């Protein structure tokens, strides 16, 4: 069983309203989203586009429901933009997160990403960095991580993601080998590892000591196979239902939870399962996920 004093549970707003495809869940308000998160038994949330930008307004809304912000996605463009430009946006987001009391920022290298391109197949079309780009990227991550930790008290966790330059097992390995553990941690996402063909259990075992944020996401294998066979985009797959909440797909979470328990994981485990809310009622699936986690981890 995982330690309730050290591990908290969160859920992402992307199940209610999708920032990449705003028509999905456009009818769902911010208030409904966070109310249903709390109702389902979660205490943490990441930040969605409908969340108030005013930190006082956001804090009040969350405190009323016994919730807090635990992380926010950050798009970095280290290999295609000047570092100073990325740093400026990064600092702005760190300031916001520090005000909200968050301890983690989740960065994803979005240079040349195909994850948001509806006309580009997600399999076989991702950009592959050359040696110089790898060096620029890893050095940039170290610099951002140093800023986050030393100036804001926030941990930089890297979010490997389908359709991006750090997607596959070998790419994650190369990034981890060439970044400083002091400044760069891993945002371990079960679904994105399974989707690309990596083994989430192998990856959690390999990097347990550098994981500072966890995304619990399941996949529907038949949908992922369809995306691959029919050369569909990442977002096509989301609409079809490639992702779902833990326990509703094909990933075996028992040994993954066991590794996190045995290695003393501390931080948030956050359910992030983007699908069409018209097909998968967000509250219903949030409750389903919460029950599954309680049953498997004791949290």
Image (cartoon, helix red, strand yellow):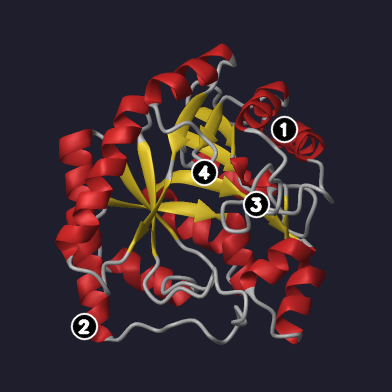
Tell me residue 42's x, y (percent).
63, 27
Q: Is 27 in front, or is 85?
A: 27
Q: CA distance from mark 1 to mark 4?
A: 24 Å
> What element does badge 4 sit on?
loop
Question: Which residue carries the number 4 mark?
Answer: 49
> Between disc 3 and disc 1, whose residue precedes?
3
Q: Residues within 10 Å of mark 1 (few under 14, many from 20)?
A: many
> What element does badge 2 sit on?
helix
Question: Which residue carries the number 2 mark?
Answer: 132
Instruction: Say which quadrant the C terminus sits in.
Output: top right
Mark 4 or 3: in front is: 4
Q: Is 1 in front, or is 289?
A: 289
Tell me residue 43's x, y (percent).
57, 24
Q: Residues within 10 Å of mark 4 (few under 14, many from 20)?
A: some
Mark 1 or 4: in front is: 4
Tell me residue 37's x, y (percent).
66, 29
Q: Residue at x 75, y 85 (%)?
A: 230
> Between disc 1 and disc 4, whose residue precedes?
4
Residue at far top of view: 64
> Between disc 2 and disc 1, whose residue precedes?
2
Q: Are marks 4 and 3 in contact (CB under 8 Å)?
A: no
> Between disc 2 and disc 3, whose residue precedes?
2
Report which quarter residue 23 is drawn in. bottom right
């Amino acid at each position: 069983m995982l330690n309730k004093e050290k591990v908290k549970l969160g859920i992402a707003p992307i199940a209610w309203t999708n920032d990449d495809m705003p028509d999905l869940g456009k009818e769902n308000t911010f208030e409904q989203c966070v109310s249903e998160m709390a109702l389902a038994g979660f205490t943490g949330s990441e930040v969605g586009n409908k969340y108030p930008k005013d930190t006082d307004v956001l804090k009040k809304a969350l405190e009323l429901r016994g919730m807090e912000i635990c992380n926010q996605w950050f798009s970095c463009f280290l290999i295609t933009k000047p570092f100073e430009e990325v740093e400026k946006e990064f600092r702005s987001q760190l300031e916001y997160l520090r005000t909200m009391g968050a301890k983690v920022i989740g960065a994803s290298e979005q240079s040349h990403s195909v994850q948001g391109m509806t006309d580009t197949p997600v399999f076989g079309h991702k950009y592959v960095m050359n040696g110089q780009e790898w060096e620029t990227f890893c050095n940039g991550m170290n610099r951002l991580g140093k800023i986050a930790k030393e100036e804001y008290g926030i941990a930089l966790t890297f979010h490997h993601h389908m359709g991006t330059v750090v997607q596959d097992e070998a790419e994650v390995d190369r990034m981890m080998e060439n970044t400083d553990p002091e400044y760069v941690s891993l945002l371990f996402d079960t679904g994105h590892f399974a989707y690309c063909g990596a083994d989430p259990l192998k990856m959690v075992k390999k990097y347990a000591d550098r994981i500072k944020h966890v995304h619990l996401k399941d996949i529907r294998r038949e949908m992922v196979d369809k995306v691959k066979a029919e050369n569909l985009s990442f977002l096509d797959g989301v609409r079809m239902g490639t992702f779902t909440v833990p326990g509703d797909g094909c990933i075996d979470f028992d040994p993954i939870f066991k590794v996190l328990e045995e290695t003393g994981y501390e931080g948030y485990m956050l359910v992030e399962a983007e699908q069409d809310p018209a097909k998968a009622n967000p509250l219903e699936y949030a409750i389903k996920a919460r029950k599954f986690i309680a049953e498997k981890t004791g949290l």
